[in-house]
Every structure is written in C-alpha cells, then in structure tokens.
C-alpha cells in the first residue's frame, strides 16, 4: 500500500490549474475558426463549404456563427485562403441576463446531465470533468441523478422529439433558482440535425437557456467555463455576440 503513497508523492499534482491559472498543456482544446476580411467571391465560396452554415459571407469579410460550428476544418484544409484558428477554451456565453443564483451556489452546485439525442461526443467530454485531470469536485460541482436536487440542468444534443416532454418535466421538477446550460453545437442550434423531422433546433426551442457552450464537441475546459459562468464565478465569453440562429433550411 505504501508504494502508492510514495508514487503519488513523486508524481505530484496533475490536475489542471484552471481557473486559477491558464491551461497551456497541448491538446486541451480543438480551437475555433476566426472570421475576418475576405473578398466577396472568396467569402461566398468559403461559406458554401460549411455544412452547417456557420460561415456567413458579408461584403469584404466573413463571419463565424459559433453556435453552428462543428469543427469540420473545411475552412482551413484544402482551401487557398484558410481562416485563422484560435486555440482558446473559454467559450461559454450568457444567452440572456439571468439573475444571480446567490452566493450559496458559488461553492457548491449540483448538476443534472441530460442526453437529449447526443451523438456521444459532447457527453463524453462532460464525463471527463469527473476525472482527476479536470476534477470539477474541487470547484464545488457535483453530479446528481435527480432533478429534485439539481441546481443546474446541463443538456447535450439537439432535443429529439421523444425527449421534449421528458426534458420539460425534468426542468419543471427542479427547484428554483435554477440554470440551464446548453452544451455543444447541437444543443445550441441543432447542428447537422437542425430542422429535421425528428428533433428541435436546440435546447432553447424547448427550455429557457441561460448559458451556451459552443463546440462539437466543446473541450472539458470550455464546459467547466460554462459552469463557472452559470454560478457567477467567471466572466462570459463574447464569442456568441451575434444573434441566436433563426430557422434555416439544411443543405441536402
């Protein structure tokens, strides 16, 4: 038994320093594309490459709707003028301006995770928050299996039709005050499944969303940032400053 104690002492603490300090380890984020200046023809051609219409051409520039971006890299690979790429992870933003949960929730909040039709990618990233590297317990976040004990409802997936009623029932069963955190492009806009015959265009079509975490999937640090934003312990990102997505037609 003592060998494990000595091994732990030799290994030291491996948990990320975030949010006390910036995380600089390789591979903690897939990054996001950055819009900017681009001539009209090139911008239109670039926008047509995006399978979810996350890229929007405008006169002399191209903009990125991060609620729809699925990290397909078609805007940086196989093109003459690739977009710049940012390797950040604090992506979460407030959808509206909810009232503060209160100081009692800042250091201890219980989270109910609901898979509303997720492909498995975002849910797997959420699971990583419980491992020793991210260790969300040190920040006062705990998973609960019941809505009666939940302060935060974390939803992944576009919300399939058979989950609409169940998701609403879960939300109604949660005590107030409460927060809804939508995680991933599918939860924010429907992603590649938007406007299909079996699902909604994201969680906001069913529930009032407080915090949005873009990405497909977002890395664990981005999800952790979303939880910190939800309880008022971290400032939100300005990535999602453009309006929430309107109804659209998916390309065949």
Image (cartoon, rainbow, N blue to C red):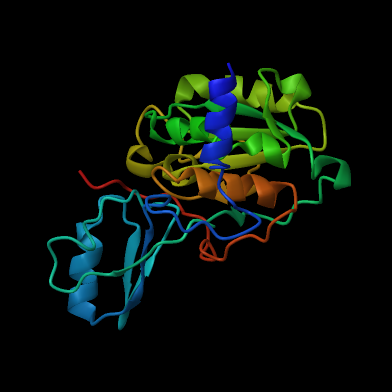
Expressed as whole percent of the image width and height from the top left, the position of residue 36 reads 35, 77
Residue 234: tell me if it is visible: yes
Foreground residue among 22 and 81: 22
Quadrant for the C terminus, please. top left
Residue at 65% in and 44% down: 227
Q: Is residue 227 above or below residue 196?
A: below
Looking at the image, residue 38 sits to the left or right of residue 181; the answer is: left
Residue at 47% in and 54% down: 245
Q: Is residue 203 above or below residue 39?
A: above
Quadrant for the N terminus, please. top right
Residue 205: tell me if it is visible: no
- Report the number of numbered marks: 0
Expressed as whole percent of the image width and height from the top left, the position of residue 92 reads 57, 54
Looking at the image, residue 76 sits to the left or right of residue 92; the answer is: left
Q: Is residue 36 above or below residue 239?
A: below
Foreground residue among 103 and 165: 103
Expressed as whole percent of the image width and height from the top left, the position of residue 21 reads 61, 59
Residue at 51% in and 65% down: 242
Looking at the image, residue 43 sits to the left or right of residue 172; the answer is: left
Expressed as whole percent of the image width and height from the top left, the position of residue 210 reads 66, 47
Q: Quadrant of residue 147?
A: top right
Residue at 14% in and 66% down: 79
Looking at the image, residue 148 sits to the left or right of residue 42; the answer is: right
């Amino acid at each position: 038994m003592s060998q494990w104690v000595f091994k732990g002492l030799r290994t030291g603490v491996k948990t990320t320093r975030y949010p006390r300090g910036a995380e600089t380890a390789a591979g903690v984020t897939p990054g996001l594309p950055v819009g900017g200046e681009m001539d009209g023809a090139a911008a239109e051609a670039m926008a047509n490459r995006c399978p979810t219409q996350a890229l929007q051409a405008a006169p002399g520039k191209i903009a990125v709707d991060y609620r729809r971006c699925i990290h397909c890299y078609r805007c940086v690979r196989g093109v003459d003028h690739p977009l710049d790429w940012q390797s950040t992870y604090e992506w979460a933003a407030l959808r509206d301006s909810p009232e503060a949960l209160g100081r009692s929730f800042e250091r201890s909040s219980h989270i109910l995770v609901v898979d509303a039709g997720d492909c498995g990618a975002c849910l797997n990233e959420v699971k990583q928050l419980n491992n020793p590297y991210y260790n969300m317990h040190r920040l006062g976040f705990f998973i609960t299996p019941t809505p009666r004990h939940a302060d935060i409802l974390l939803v992944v997936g576009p919300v399939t039709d058979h989950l609409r009623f169940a998701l609403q029932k879960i939300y109604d069963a949660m005590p107030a005050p409460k927060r809804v955190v939508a995680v991933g492009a599918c939860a924010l806009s429907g992603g590649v499944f938007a406007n299909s015959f079996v699902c909604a265009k994201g969680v906001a079509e069913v529930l009032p969303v407080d915090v949005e975490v873009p990405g497909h999937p977002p890395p664990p640090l981005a999800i952790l940032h979303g939880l910190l934003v939800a309880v008022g312990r971290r400032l939100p990102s300005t990535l999602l400053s453009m309006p929430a997505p309107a109804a659209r037609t998916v390309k065949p």
